[in-house]
Image (cartoon, rainbow, N blue to C red):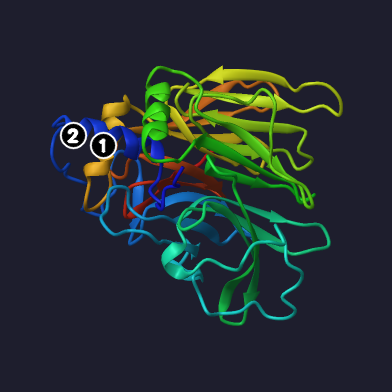
């Protein structure tokens, strides 16, 4: 089957939207266009759908995945950005012609990968940043375009600021539309398959299965020199964000359609052990705090509310959201932010950096900022 040539956040949302819009479900939704604080959240504007956020080395810069706007005509490309909140400096890491200083190092990923994506075909989605012991800091990026893939970049600083150099990729298997990625120091890659990402009847069936609360995806793992393999026991309703401990023994994923967080304890022999905890929202991306807890950002509302974001053509989607902090050892949850979507909305990621909590969105022109208390 033909694969989607799209970088819209959530093929699942686009598919359902087709059905609802065809049935006459409303017109354009008025987005938040004023760049003003509200209900305890400040905003920094001028971004393009900052779907995922990840801390870069040193604690001053944030990697921002800017993906094409869902529902925007002709939008097929995006960018990977480095942002320094203290002075709002922004540097495009890719597509960029600024090379990493020094030896570019060895390629990583699938040797058959043909080369870096052309600028029009780069549609970043979920991202992860890891510093490899004795090696580089590497950024893994889910990208949609001509290929659905995980793109790898080595990150560093030049006299002019942060730079990233493409070092390889892995294409995901046919019928796998990746959402988020974890790159472990060992080189293992873990990806969430939200759904199949195919057009036609299979796409419709994926949409129907999600609506009925049936499995649409799972987690996959790849190791250097190996092939993609499904992680046993991880099938769920629209798996979305993914995170893992550095040794890979504990893997966590947000089940967007099931409104829960799932912990997968992997063992050297035998099947994994699974635990889960319900969440008060539709969970999206995950991030680690400095003290080893998980942050889960998610949208509040039913599917129709979420689909309204596809009809926002300008500004941010005014959809309520919350951020939950999770103790990974007990899965105890704590809501640390609830917001009605008046400053920003449709939150897809939350990142704690110092005394601030940064909030990304899959439909919006801004990053939210609120106080963070450990």
Residue 312 percent across, percent down from the top left: 22, 46
Q: Which residue is mark 2?
A: 22
Residue 98 percent across, percent down from the top left: 56, 80
Dot 2: element: helix
The answer to which of 292 and 103 lies nearer the viewer is 103
Mark 1 Cα-neighbour bin, 10 Å: few <14, some 14–19, many ≥20: few
The answer to which of 239 and 286 lies nearer the viewer is 239
- Residue 342, visible in the rendered structure: no
State which quadrant residue 182 falls in.
top right
- Give the alpha-carbon distance from disc 2 to disc 1, as whole Å: 6 Å
369 lies left or right of 97: left
The answer to which of 171 and 234 lies nearer the viewer is 171
152 lies left or right of 188: left
Dot 1: element: helix
The quarter of the rendered structure image containing the C terminus is: top right
Task: State the residue at coordinates (49%, 36%).
Answer: 196
Q: Which residue is mark 1?
A: 18
* Residue 180 sits above or below residue 50 on the image: above
State which quadrant residue 257 falls in.
top left
241 lies left or right of 183: left
Mark 2 Cα-neighbour bin, 10 Å: few <14, some 14–19, many ≥20: few
Residue 122 percent across, percent down from the top left: 47, 62
State which quadrant residue 101 falls in.
bottom right
The reply to whether dot 2 and dot 1 touch (C-beta < 8 Å) is: yes
């Amino acid at each position: 089957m033909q694969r989607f040539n799209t970088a819209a956040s959530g093929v699942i949302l686009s598919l359902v939207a087709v059905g609802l819009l065809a049935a006459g479900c409303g017109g354009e939704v008025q987005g938040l266009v004023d760049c003003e604080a509200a209900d305890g959240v400040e905003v920094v504007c001028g971004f393009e759908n900052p779907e995922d956020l990840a801390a870069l080395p040193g604690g001053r810069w944030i990697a921002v995945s800017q993906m094409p706007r869902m529902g925007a005509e002709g939008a097929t490309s995006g960018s990977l950005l480095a942002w320094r909140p203290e002075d709002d400096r922004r540097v495009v890491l890719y597509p960029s012609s600024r090379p990493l200083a020094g030896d570019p190092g060895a390629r990583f990923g699938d040797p058959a990968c043909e080369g870096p994506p052309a600028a029009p075909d780069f549609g970043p989605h979920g991202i992860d940043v890891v510093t490899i012991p004795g090696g580089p800091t590497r950024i893994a990026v889910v990208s949609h375009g001509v290929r659905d893939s995980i793109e790898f970049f080595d990150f560093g600083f030049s006299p002019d600021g942060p730079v990233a150099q493409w070092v390889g990729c892995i294409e995901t298997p046919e019928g796998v539309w990746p959402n988020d990625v974890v790159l472990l120091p060992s080189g293992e890659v873990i990806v969430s398959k939200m759904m199949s990402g195919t057009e036609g009847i299979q796409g419709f069936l994926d949409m129907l299965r999600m609506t009925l609360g049936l499995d649409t995806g799972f987690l996959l793992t790849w190791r250097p020199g190996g092939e993609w393999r499904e992680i046993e026991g991880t099938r769920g309703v629209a798996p979305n964000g993914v995170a893992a401990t550095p040794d890979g023994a504990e893997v966590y994923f947000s089940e967007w359609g099931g409104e829960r967080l799932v912990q997968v304890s992997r063992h050297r022999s035998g099947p994994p052990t699974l635990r889960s905890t319900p969440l008060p929202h539709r969970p999206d991306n995950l991030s680690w705090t400095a003290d080893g807890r998980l942050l889960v950002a998610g949208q509040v509302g039913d599917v129709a509310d979420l689909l309204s974001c596809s009809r926002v053509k300008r500004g941010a989607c005014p959809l309520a959201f919350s951020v939950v902090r999770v103790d990974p050892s007990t899965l105890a949850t704590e809501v640390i932010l609830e917001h009605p979507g008046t400053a920003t909305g449709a939150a897809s990621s939350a990142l704690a950096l110092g005394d601030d909590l940064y909030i990304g969105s899959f439909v919006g022109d801004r990053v939210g900022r609120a106080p963070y208390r450990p």
